[in-house]
Amino acid sequence: MEEREILIQEDYLDNPWKMMVCCILLNQTNNKQVRPILSSVFELIPTPISTIGCDPERLAAVIKTTGFQNVKASRIIKLSKKWVDGFIDAIELPGIGKYGRDSWEIFINGNLNIEVADKKLDAYLKAINRPSN
């Protein structure tokens, strides 16, 4: 039986804000690019409040290896502002598209019966929904 890759979202089940930050970091890249920088990211921005006051250039420097660092830094700061202000649906969060919303549905709402476009999320759902022998 082949082992399934542990998704970054699974590491942040107890912190939905961090999981959403990870979803932004995963845009246009993969777990192998993002995982090594996460401790540095969350040392710099441990909470939504601390992120709001973070210098975007400093954050961009930390996430540079993921590509599109200036856009991602801006989105993470905007996401954090909206997080603090409040939201009803994850899709309202800046920088959170279908992938982020699907991640929210699966990992926060526990909805394992959704249609996803992302290959990694699809593989996760198939592995989780597969009956055990």
Image: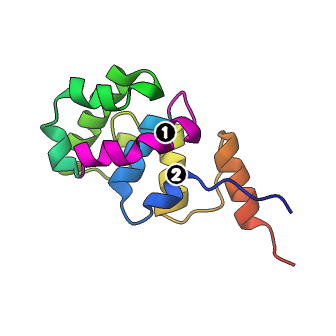
Residue depicted at x 55% and y 30%:
29
* Crowd class of label 1 (few under 14; some 14 to 19; many from 20; radius 10 Å): some
Q: Is residue 109 visible?
A: yes
Residue 37, percent from left and from top: 41, 40
> Which numbered disc, 1 or 2, marks the residue that appears first in the sequence?
2
Residue 59, percent from left and from top: 27, 31
The magenta segment is: 27-46
Residue depicted at x 37% and y 24%:
69
- On residue 120, the disc is none
Q: Is residue 36 magenta?
A: yes
Q: How many marks?
A: 2
Residue 107, percent from left and from top: 51, 60
Q: CA distance from mark 1 to mark 2?
A: 9 Å
- On residue 34, the disc is 1
Q: Is residue 85 visible?
A: no
Amino acid type of the residue that numbered disc 1 sits on in the rendered structure: Val
Looking at the rendered structure, the secondary structure element under dot 2 is: helix
